[in-house]
Amino acid sequence: MALLDVTDLKVHFHTRNGVVPAVDGISFRVEAGKTLAIIGESGSGKSIACYSLVGLIPKPPGRIEDGCALFEGQDLLTLSEAQLRKVRGKGISIIFQDPMTSLNPYMTIGEQLIEPLQLHFSMSRRDAWQKGIQTLEEVGIQNAERRMHAYPFEFSGGMRQRVVIAMALVAEPQLIIADEPTTALDVTVQAQILKLLRDLQQRRNIGVIFISHDLSVVADIADNICVMQDGRFVEQGERMAIFQTPQHEYTRKLLAAVPAGAKRPVSHSPEPLITITDLYTQFYGNRGGPAVKAVDGISLQINRHEILGLVGESGSGKSTLGRSILRLLQPCSGSIRFDGRELVHLSAAELKPLRRRMQMIFQDPYSSLNPRMTVYDTLAEPLLLHGVVDRKGLDTAVFELMDAVGLARANVLRYPHEFSGGQRQRIAIGRAIGTKPEFIVADEPVSALDVTIQAQILDLLLDLVARFNLSMLFISHDLAVVRYLADRIVVMKAGKLVESGTTHDMFTSPQQPYTQALLAAIPGRVLRDLDDSPL
Amino acid sequence: MTTADLHVIPRGVSLWQDAWTRLRKNKLAMAGLVFLLLVTLLCLLTPWLVAYGYEQQDLRLGAVPPSADHWLGTDTFGRDQLTRILYGGRMSLAVGFIATAVALLIGVTYGAIAGYAGGRIDNAMMRLVDMLYALPFMIFIILLMVVFGRNLLLLFLAIGAVEWLTMARIVRGQILSLRQQDFVEAAVSLGLGPVAIVWRHLIPNALGPVIVYTTLTIPNVMLLEALLSFLGLGVQAPAASWGLLISSGVETMEEYPWLLIFPGLTLTLSLFALNFLGDGLRDALDPRTAKD
């Protein structure tokens, strides 16, 4: 018998603008010791479907209209709030996406860990504490006894996610709902956490519902996969069946969106546009603390018409390097030559004419656009500032920019909040290419986007680079994306350059152990194997 | 605006015009605006509208309740109350708007500079604000009056010069958090100078709290004026202001309640109108609250 058996679940949101069928009649089963992955883009209803089972959706406006969810012989959907509280934590527990916000910053890890034990099992404090230590050890935290007294801020992102997993496990639930548990993490850490989840699940024989927008993440760990779109499952089945013989068009679209393959090498004689020599950028610590060398003696070269991929984990200094090149941060020493001109000591006024020639695209399209400026104002500002066009030609220029980045002209007077993430990123890209720059720093421009949108934006970037003869520094932690886009790759770790080479060389014969570890951590091995063997 | 092949954009579309379009749809805010404009107009045209002078006494009459001759009654000196409320409105509205404008101008500029500059400059500027906070307000005003003589314009400026401190703090806090956002860095990388960044990108985003605080400042300032007048530092009888009329009305409220009720009602209604207008403005200036 299945651990959890959901039939025909319907959750509707009753808003002022009418009824939104967030979850529209889905059925699935989770077996003990198996992982069910629910895949879908943001807004597809995957989180709501799971949270409604344990009563964690806001009611109103949310309402469970229909369905049945059998868990340990009782229908979860008919339970009272008091009964549900017993289920949560003890029977079913949840691992949230962002380990930075899902722990209480003012409580020690230990206090947070033993809370469910004292609550659900009325354990004595001493016993609960012992159990907490055991669980921390089980999720791979060193010196668990001492770390029980630590506060969340004393842990790195990956370690925090381990703590969150420990919290989910400590009351020994039969079912875990993992809501994008690795989305906020680096690739290598993601690989560790996925492995940990897999091990724990098999050792304890628990069921897991793994929610994700990324097919390649679940490719290695899921037993069964449900593909969700607009509140319905468009396809569900066994993992390999989904990958090898996808039936529904949307599944095929998702599979196609996983960045695969490498960019074909373009052969042109390398002509340096930017030459960086021995660059250092430091941040001074608070209250006379030690300075942090975010960029620690980097030398590299970016050629004309090439996309240079800059890869590294969070904290490796890759964003700092990108911002230093554009002089958004002031380097302490070293040299940056842009088209033969030294940038490091230029004043703001001397830099202004050069700003027209180098631009930036930011990671988060939600904070990189001024919420009080329409698309028109946002795109027109750099054009007017640098005198690219006069007022008469402005409208035409703005419209042409919107065409170039694939925004409908009718949207010209809309504000950023009226757009989706992908469309916002298009606006930001339009702003960056408006002045016809030669060089663009793109800082993780697709990591905040859904997979299908991500693929569209990547293709847009490739298209623009070719069309406008751009050079680009493409910063990313996602190696699959970099492989898809970059001509050459530079790997950074702790402010230093680890290895550099052409994309092909880096992926086929990485020299440094760090690069090898990064490559090994790329999720979706199954997908790549499929890719290499044509069906 | 539905065709996909647009080529021309309706001219002059800015945040402010957009805001005006949205404000016009807000009935309560528009009612507030119309009411305030009406009151202001009445006060400005008072000398041509009323039959009495504000200082014109009729001691034989004394305080009489509202009648056909005196619509809102008279005070203990037999002066027409309606006339005095309208003349008082000139003073109160002037002090309210001028002092608040001064506070806005200094406070927003000062706060925006401190917030955007950050670091040591911010620290120094904000410590100065702290010092001015510590200065006893009354002594400051009395000192000004002693040095420059009693001058109404100076009074307005003095009140404004005190009220800007809180405004500066609010704006600085807003700017500090806003400048962490990527769109500010984007503006820097476009080559915009600090003035353009503060003016075009930061201040429009900080307007919400500024407007709310402004609508709170105006009544505050009006009451301050009443307090100063009561101490003999502001408006002196026979001249009138709403604050003065209310405070003298309080003294005789048991015998002649209309002397308190009517000026009080005028002030209250005006402040209601002001608050509705302020709320409407705040919503109108935020594109996110637009409903379509």
Image (tube, rainbow, N blue to C red):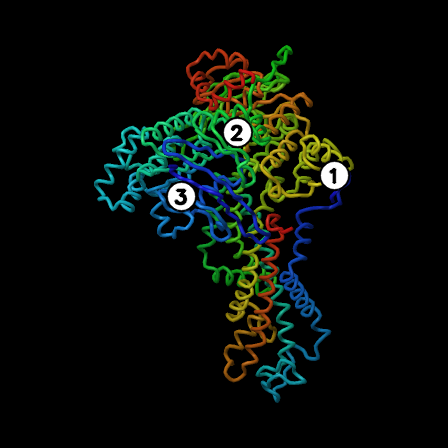
A160 vs A11: above or below: above
Parent chain of label 2 = A
Question: In the structure shown, which secondary structural element does the residue marked by tag 2 occupy?
Answer: loop
Look at the image and tell me in which quarter the N terminus of chain A lies: top left
- The residue wearing badge 3 is A70
Look at the image and tell me in which quarter the C terminus of chain A lies: top right
Q: Amino acid at mark 3?
A: Leu
Share a chain, discs 3 and 2?
yes
x and y percentages locating residue B18 in the rendered image: 68, 50
- The residue wearing badge 1 is B4
Q: Residue at position x 58%, y 65% from top? A: B272
Q: Amino acid at mark 1?
A: Ala
Share a chain, discs 2 and 1?
no
Q: Counting residues from the N terminus, which is met first, the one under dot 3 or under dot 2?
A: 3
x and y percentages locating residue A266 in the rendered image: 63, 14
Residues at marks 3 and 2, CA–CA distance in whole angstroms: 56 Å
Parent chain of label 3 = A
A218 vs A89: above or below: above
User: Nearer the observer, disc 3 or disc 2?
Assistant: 3
- The residue wearing badge 2 is A329
